[in-house]
Amino acid sequence: MKRYIISLDQGTTSSRAIIFDKNQQIAGTAQHELPQIYPKEGWVEHDPMEIYATQYGVMAEALTKYNISIDEIAAIGITNQRETTILWDKETGKPVYNAIVWQCRRTAEICEQLKKDGHETYIKEATGLLIDAYFSATKVKWILDNVEGVRERAKKGEILFGTVDTWLMWKLSQGKIHATDYSNASRTMMFNINTLQWDKKILEILDIPEQILPEVHASSYVYGNANILNNVVPIAAVAGDQQASLFGQGCTKEGQAKNTYGTGCFLMMNTGSSPCRSKNSLLTSIAASTKEKCVQYVLEGSIFSAGSVVQWMKDELCFFDKSSDSENLACQVNDSGGVYVVPAFTGMGAPYWDMYARGCIMGITRGTKSAHIIRAALESIAFQTHDLVECMQKDTGIQLSELNVDGGASGNNFLMQFQSDILQIPVRRPEMKEITSLGIAQLAGLSIGMFKSLDEIRTVQRNITVLNPQMAEEPRDKLLHGWEKAVSRSRNWVEH
């Protein structure tokens, strides 16, 4: 009996497989860390074969560990780190270069040239995005420009491009599926969000051959079949991780918002059937869609370094052994002692969009302890979220009455309470930790008819923890003023 859906959640730092039953409850899970490659300062890569191997491995592990037969799997849904760029040989399936990760800043100069050449307005109107090294387009151009022979082979139709979802589908289908969904396509800086097609003018500007690009469909759509353990299973949904999270949080109506605290931090608001053009350097993208050619739009602010700040303190500063220890250590001091951490490891995202900013620790005195720095680092995640919320409210005219949260760092009670204090609104955290994977499972279930409607999906009751603001206005304003000063010191640090 086909009674389960597997969510493949391929993230920046790990590959996960989560099996959901018909009641949208977790029946099995497995996770494997994904190694990061840092060839130069500001460069970030992954091995595409390792992305696939870890993802396939955790899928097989989850099935085996929880004694679930592949025959019981009704469908697969894929949700993924977005913007990360892979080019591979159409015949052999061999990548022509490592995956260039969304965090990578190597194409900053290409972006500067695009701005100098006057393409900023058109690209923003067509794609909803600002010109930045974050997105896939300039990463594709870099590979075509820098890996010998690849551009010529791409023009001959011998090379394929994909974001991580496309790569996984191509591998799982043994080369039969070369596709993506609207949500992932809208993050490439090559997709026109008004016409729902690849933008020929942008492709011409960047000299990217259109034949390397995948087909684009709704998120909730049967893309074709995967071959898993000698069995055929339909791939029935694909969505970028943040859009899957928005759907999993139930934010399917205009004005509903969520923030995901992962490697980065991603604030997203559903803006309905019309794109909202930001005047405050936020991005307009496409939400996870349930019907072909019928989309909702989102406004999004991206923070490059959130959970990665905690990982940095664990791995590089050796402040603690487990990321979860950061909460207790932060609570050993009553405040940050005037210390601010600006985690601009790879520049700053919205609303600053400063590719040349770098991280700094400000306000250190002789009495500063590691606990002060740990607390300040956690606070930096909440401060950055505050900056995004302010911009989003200005753009939409909608005052948030609450914030839905998910992602690994949302389990940190200190951080979530501080977030509520700084925003002065309630923070709602579902007990279900795997909201992104739940969202893609729901989308897959809709496309194969396991779930008949959105209303049916929403009938499942979820336990929610609500944290309400407790901080007075004066200390909050003082903290925000100090944060603004610290950010100003970190900006435009790299000479260019």
Image: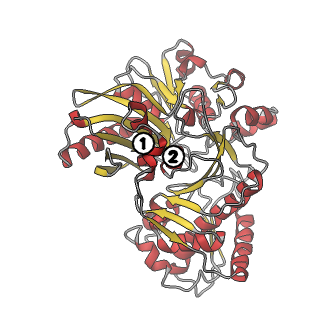
Label 2 element class:
helix
Q: How many marks overall?
A: 2
The residue singled out by tag 1 in the image is 442
Residue 275 on image: x %, y %: 71, 39
Q: Is residue 110 above or below residue 206?
A: below
Q: In the rendered image, which residue does mark 2 sit on?
A: 247
Of labels 1 and 2, earlier in sequence is 2
Amino acid type, callout 2: Phe
Res. 319 visible in picture: no
How far apart are the two marked residues, 1 and 2, measured between alpha carbons?
8 Å
Quarter containing the N terminus: top left
Task: Mark yes or no: residue 274 visible.
Answer: yes
Is 450 on the left or on the right of 485, as rendered?
A: left
**Residue 92: image x %, image y %?**
37, 20
Q: Residue at x 31, y 51 (%)?
A: 26
Quick check: 309 above or below 467?
Answer: above
Q: Is residue 54 above or below residue 223?
A: below
- Residue 76 lies, with reference to residue 323, above or below; the image says above
Q: Nearer the viewer, residue 75 or 104?
A: 75
Question: Could you tell whether 229 is left or right of 349 in the image?
Answer: left
Q: For this rendering, which residue is in front, 47 or 186?
A: 186
Give the residue furthest to the left: 67
Q: Does the residue at mark 1 contact the one at mark 2 (Cβ under 8 Å)? A: yes
Task: Work out whether residue 152 or residue 383 is closer to the camera in this orientation and state it.
Answer: 383
Between residues 282 and 156, which one lies in front from this camera angle? 282
